[in-house]
Amino acid sequence: MHVARIRGRHVDRQGRRRDYESRYLRRTYRDGGKVRHETLANLSGLPEQAVDAIEAALKGTPLVPAGQAVTITTSTPHGHVAAVHAMAARLGLPALLGPPGRPRDLALALIISRVAAPASKLSTLAWWDDVTLGADLGVTGASTDDIYAAMDWLDGRQDAIEAELARRHLAPEANPSKMALFDLSSSWLEGTRCPLAARGYSRDGKKGRLQIEYGLLTDPAGRPVAVRVLPGNTGDPAAFTQIVTVLRDKFGLAQMVMVGDRGMITSARIAALNQREDGTARPDPYGWITALRAPAIKKLMAEDGPLQLSLSGEQDLAEITSPDFPGERLVACRNPHLAADRARKREDLLQATEKLLAPILARVQAGRLAGAGPIGVEVGKVISKYKTGKHFAITITDTRLAIERRQDQIHDEAALDGFYVLRTPLPASQLDAPAVVTAYKNLKYVERDFRSIKADDLDLRPVFHRLEERVKAHVLICMLACYLTWHLRKAWAPLTFTDENPPAPQNPVAPARRSAAAQAKASRQRDTAGRPYRSFRGLIEHLATLARNQVRFTGTAVTVPILTEPTSAQQEAFDLIGTPIPLTLK
C-alpha cells in the first residue's frame, strides 16, 4: 500500500484556474503480467499532517509522539561567552596575548570570563564546566596550578601586550594630538603576605586595610592601554614618574602630552619631567595638562589678582598669566553649578557636625560631663567625622564647652567654590583654552574605567592573591577585560541606556548633557519594537539565555548541537559586533 498524490487543474467558465491535489490510499498488485492499482480510500479530505503521517508509516518510518521525538541531553549557556569571544577575535586579542598554546587559551578564557561573569579564580574554574567557553577553548578540567601558570605566563607578556596597544592607540597615526590620560586608584587585599600590600589613602573607603595602588593609562577617549601595579602607599606623583618612563623607554613615544589631576602632576614632577638623570634637557620634551591646588588659586584671587579680575560678571573662562608660573598658560574656569553644589554640601556637613556636637554640649551644660580632658575626648570623636573641624572654633574648660563657626574661614573657602585653574606649557597654536579644558575634563573617562574595573563590570576587588606577580597578572586581566568592555559598550549602545551620540558642549566649562535620544531611552524604557533597554550587565545576562543544546533524535545514538532560536535583541547584539551567531567558539 502507498499514498498516491495526483495533481489536477480546473478552469471554470470565467477562465479562472485552480490547481489542486488529490490523495488516495492505494494497493498495488500484479495481475498476471500487469500491474494494477486498487483505491482503498480517498484521503483528500484529511489534514496534510495526517496524510504525511500515514505515508510515513507505510514507508516504515517509526512514529512517536511529538514530545518524545527528540531528547535534549544538555543545554549549555552560550550567547554571552560567544559574544565576548567574537569581540575579542575582532580586536585581535588572542594574537595580542601571544603565540598559540594552552597558556594563551587559559589566559583568554580568564579575560572573557572576567567580562561575562566576574568571580574568583576558583569559581571561574567551576563555571567553565557550565558554559560552552570551557569545552570550546579546551580549558574544562583545568587545575588551579594551570591557572597560576597561565597568569605567570601572561605577566611575562605584559610589556609586549601593552606596547602593541600603545602602537594602536597612542602612536601619532592613531592619536594625532599625542595625548594620554593617566590616573591612580587603589583596592584592598585579603591577607597580609603580599609584598605590595601597604596602608595608604584608600579610595574605596576601607580605612586601615592593606591595599595596592594601580595606575591606568588610556588614550584621549578612555580606551585602556596600560596598567601599573604599585605598593599601597605609593603617592600619585611617584606613579606618574613611572608611567612616563614606560611611555618613553618601553613604548618609544616622544613628545606626548600627559593629562593628570592636580595631585598627580606636581611642580616637582613638572621640573623633572623633561630632564635626564644628569640634569640636561631631553630632546623630546613632554607636554602636560593639570590643575592648580586651592592655595595657589587663592593666591591668584588675592587682592586684585589676575583671577579675580579675569572672571567677573558672566564670564566663565579666561586665560591668564602669573609670574609664579613662568612659561605656562593658566586657564581659569568658573562653574556656577559646581559652586552651588559645593555650597550646599558644605552647609549640610556643617549642620551634620553641629548635630553630633549638640548632645555633648547638652551634657556639659547639664553637668553630666565635666573636665577638660573627658570633654575633649568626646568632642574629638565626632568633630572630624565630616572633615569640617577646621570650620569650628572650640573652647573647652573643666566646666564649659563653647562651639561656634569660623565664619571668616568658611567665607574664604566659599570664595573658591566653582573655580578651578588649569596649567599647561602647550602653546595656544597647539591647543586653545577651550581645548585645554576639554582635555582635562576627559579624565572622567579614566574614572569611568575605574568604575568598570572595580565595581560595575569586572569586580577586581578585593584581591586574594599573595604573590606579587599574581597580583599584577590579576590586575592586567582586569585591564584587558576593560579593553573588551570598552568596545562592547560602544558597539551595544543601541541596545542599552548608553548615550549613542552625546552632544558636543558649546561651552566646555558647562556640565555635560545627555542627548534627547538618551533621555527618551531613560523615559520610555523600551525601543520602538517594544524591547526593553538593558544595562550592559543586563544585556550580558540576556545573552546567556541563548543556549547550545545537544539534541538526540529518537532511534539514534548520535547527538547534534543546535542553538536555541535567538531573540531579536540577541541577534542584533551579534549584528552590532559584525559577526553571525557561532555554533562553537572556534
Image (spheres, helix red, strand yellow):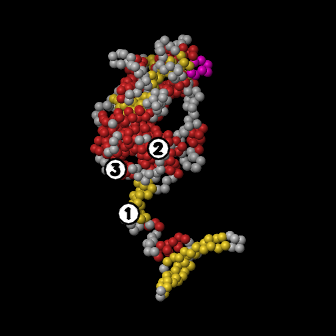
Range of residues picked out in magenta: 311-317
Q: Find the distance from the CA under tag 3 to the CA under tag 1.
A: 22 Å
Numbered label attached to residue 558: 1
Question: Along the horizontal axis of the image, is 47 left or right of 455?
Answer: right
Kindly identify the amino acid type of the residue bearing the numbered disc 1: Val
Of the numbered discs 2 and 1, the one sitting upstream in the chain is: 2
The residue pinned by badge 3 equals 138
* Mark 2: few/some/many CA within 10 Å (<14, 14-19, 20+): some
The residue pinned by badge 2 equals 537
Q: Position of residue 461 (x, y in %)?
A: 38, 37
Which of the 4 quarters of the picture holds residue 434? top right
Q: Nearer the viewer, mark 2 or mark 3?
A: 3
Does the magenta run of residues contain 31?
Answer: no
Kindly identify the amino acid type of the residue bearing the numbered disc 2: Arg
Question: Along the horizontal axis of the image, is 469 left or right of 539?
Answer: left
483 w.r.t. 305: above or below: below
Seen at 33% across and 44% down, the residue is 100
